[in-house]
Image (cartoon, helix red, strand yellow):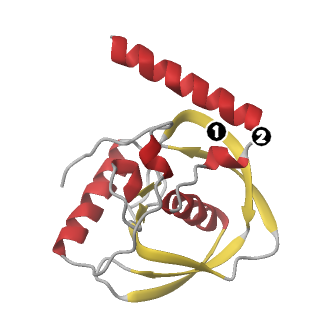
Amino acid sequence: MAVREIITAPDPRLREVSKPVDKVDDDLRALMDDMLETMYDAPGIGLAAIQIGVPKRVIVMDLAGKDEEPEPRYFVNPEILDPSEDKQLYEEGCLSVPDYYDEIERPARCRVKFLDYDGTEQVLDAEGMLAVCIQHEMDHLEGVLFIDYLSRLKRDRVLKKLKKEQRLAAAS
């Protein structure tokens, strides 16, 4: 397992639409292990493969609290089925948009069909933080960032700040 570099906005690779995975094999499991280690190291609660430069439809997450036993989850080729009509506001952040948080409205519940770590098809009913995290990470698979839900003014301000920080980091 290895910690990989997390791509940050406005890197154009984050706008790529990820490709479906043909099969869950040892190479894909190694990728998921690296993703999980990278996510824990960051630290974060979810990570899409595109965030480490791999345009595959793969997500990892772990919503366990700091003092709780880890509960890693793996989603290969996830599909959202039946999102609820009712919406919910949650404050979101993103490892690819560091140090910025804002409230985003999403469906409060959804059903997700996916392949697990072993390649077995699963269906999961998600609500609350789990539903938010799945939807957030699945947006990455479509080249969408959570800041895309903000007003143009807020989004442009965040991207301008990130570009400036990247220029300063490159100059030092």
Visible residue check, residue 63: no
Name above or below for residue 46 compared with residue 156: below
For the point 48% across and 20% down, the residue is 165
Amino acid type, callout 1 = Tyr
The picture places residue 70, in percent across and down from the top left corner, at: 38, 61
User: In what element is the residue under mark 2?
Assistant: loop
For disc 2, the marked residue is 151
First along the sequence among labels 1 and 2 = 1
For the point 63% across and 62% down, the residue is 132
Visible residue check, residue 31: yes
Of residues 52 and 128, the one nearer the viewer is: 52
For the C terminus, which image quadrant?
top left
Indicate the quadrant where residue 122 lies: bottom left
Farthest residue to the right: give it: 86
Determine which of the numbered discs, if any, sits on residue 101 in the image. Answer: 1
The picture places residue 7, in percent across and down from the top left corner, at: 39, 41
The picture places residue 156, in percent across and down from the top left corner, at: 67, 31
Name above or below for residue 127 compared with residue 171: below
Farthest residue to the top: give it: 172
Determine which of the numbered discs, if any, sits on residue 124 in the image. Answer: none
Of residues 137 and 143, the one nearer the viewer is: 143
Real-space CA distance between mark 1 and mark 2, rounded to the nearest whole angstrom:
14 Å
